[in-house]
Image (cartoon, rainbow, N blue to C red):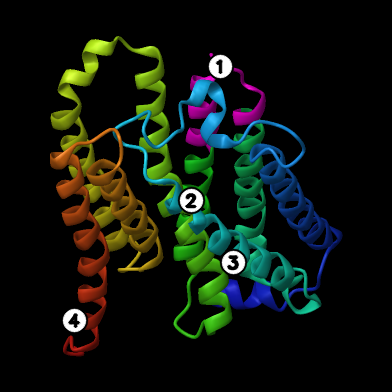
């Protein structure tokens, strides 16, 4: 903590200004990539791109379209972070020096995934998996740094714009990776694989729950990743119980999993408030 405090009071360097500019540029690229990815410039909407692989009824593990509205909240959080980190008071902040470059990379990869979806072509679904895997890896590193540099005296702005925005981004990207891989396998694998969809889908959901709980426990029961994963699981249940690609086992499992990944971290945070102080 002494080292962090010393770094925080050190003089700003040209590298600090470069970092702030890079973060702003990365956010701008992400927004442009999003506009390209959704077909705002005359391209193909995401659900119709890559041969329709991302349509909710194309894969058993793809959530309903409404689930993707969470991007609005994630983008709002990242916009808030971009503006906040650009303030002169944050230029030489020790925590920004550690996490700023990684958050910038996650925004570039976010926009890159959307551009890849638009231009990969019908046979390029596995290219989107690669980009999304890189995004999740970068988010994991960013979140590790955020948790490691967390301080008890952090203000609500820092908590919301670092832990909150990146936590939501990581949680949603984790679930999106599951959906992306499932879409790729569905698009390129034999039709006979569909016979095992219920069993495989439930097993995958169990794995997602384990990942979510491990992430929550490691981050001292942060809520943001679990909230994003739970949101996606609820809409996965909606798609499987009410969509054309019906699966009661997957739908029920997704509902139960959503409750676990949201309520367990919330309950553990409440219990921590009553933990005896040694």
Q: Say which residue label 2 marks.
A: 68
Query: Which is nearer the N-term, disc 1 or disc 2?
Result: 2
Instruction: Please tell me whether mark 4 sits on a helix, a strand or a loop.
Output: helix
Q: Are marks 4 and 2 in contact (CB under 8 Å)?
A: no
**Nearer to me, 170 or 273:** 170
On residue 271, the disc is 4
Q: Is residue 196 left or right of residue 165?
A: left
Q: Say which residue label 1 marks.
A: 122
Q: Say which residue label 3 marks.
A: 77
Q: Quadrant of residue 223?
A: bottom left
Query: Which is nearer the N-term, disc 3 or disc 2?
Result: 2
**C-alpha span from label 1 to label 2:** 21 Å
Q: Say which residue appears at 34% left-offset and 51% top-offset.
A: 235
On residue 250, the disc is none
**C-alpha span from label 4 to label 3:** 28 Å
**Image quadrant where one finds the C terminus:** bottom left
Instruction: Please tell me whether mark 3 sits on a helix, a strand or a loop.
Output: helix
The residue mark sitting in front, 3 or 2, is 2
Q: Is residue 162 left or right of residue 108?
A: left
Where is residue 147 drawn, in percent x and y? 45, 64
Instruction: Please tell me whether mark 1 sits on a helix, a strand or a loop.
Output: loop
Queried whether the magenta region covers residue 252, the answer comes back as: no
Task: Please rate how many residues cluster around mark 1, counting C-alpha atoms within 10 Å: few if below 14, some from 14 to 19, many from 20.
Answer: some
Q: Do the residues labelled 3 and 1 touch (CB within 8 Å)?
A: no
Report if residue 117 is visible in the image.
yes
**Nearer to me, 104 or 122:** 122
Q: Residue furthest right?
A: 14
Q: Do the residues labelled 1 and 2 touch (CB within 8 Å)?
A: no
Q: Say which residue appears at 62% left-offset and 65% top-offset.
A: 76
Query: Which is nearer the N-term, disc 3 or disc 1?
Result: 3
The residue mark sitting in front, 4 or 2, is 2
In this picture, is 90 found above or below 50?
below
């Amino acid at each position: 903590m002494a080292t962090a405090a010393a770094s925080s009071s050190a003089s700003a360097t040209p590298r600090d200004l470069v970092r702030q500019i890079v973060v702003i540029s990365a956010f701008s690229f992400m927004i442009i990539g999003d506009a390209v990815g959704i077909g705002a410039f005359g391209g193909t909407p995401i659900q119709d791109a890559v041969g329709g692989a991302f349509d909710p009824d194309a894969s058993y593990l793809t959530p309903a379209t409404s689930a993707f509205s969470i991007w609005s909240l994630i983008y709002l959080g990242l916009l808030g972070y971009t503006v906040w980190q650009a303030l002169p008071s944050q230029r030489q902040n020790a925590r920004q020096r550690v996490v700023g470059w990684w958050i910038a990379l996650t925004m570039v990869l976010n926009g890159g995934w959307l551009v890849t979806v638009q231009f990969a072509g019908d046979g390029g679904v596995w290219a989107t998996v690669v980009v999304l895997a890189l995004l999740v890896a970068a988010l994991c590193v960013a979140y590790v740094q955020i948790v490691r540099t967390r301080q008890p005296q952090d203000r609500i702005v820092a908590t919301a714009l670092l832990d909150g925005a990146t936590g939501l981004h990581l949680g949603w990207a984790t679930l999106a990776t599951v959906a992306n891989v499932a879409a790729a396998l569905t698009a390129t694998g034999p039709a006979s694989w569909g016979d095992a969809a219920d069993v495989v889908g439930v097993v995958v959901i169990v794995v997602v729950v384990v990942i979510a709980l491990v992430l929550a426990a490691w981050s001292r029961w942060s809520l943001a990743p679990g909230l994003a994963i739970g949101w996606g699981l609820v809409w996965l249940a909606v798609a499987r119980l009410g969509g054309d690609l019906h699966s009661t086992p997957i739908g029920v499992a997704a509902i139960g999993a959503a409750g676990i990944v949201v309520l367990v971290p919330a309950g553990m945070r409440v219990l921590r408030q009553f933990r005896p102080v040694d």
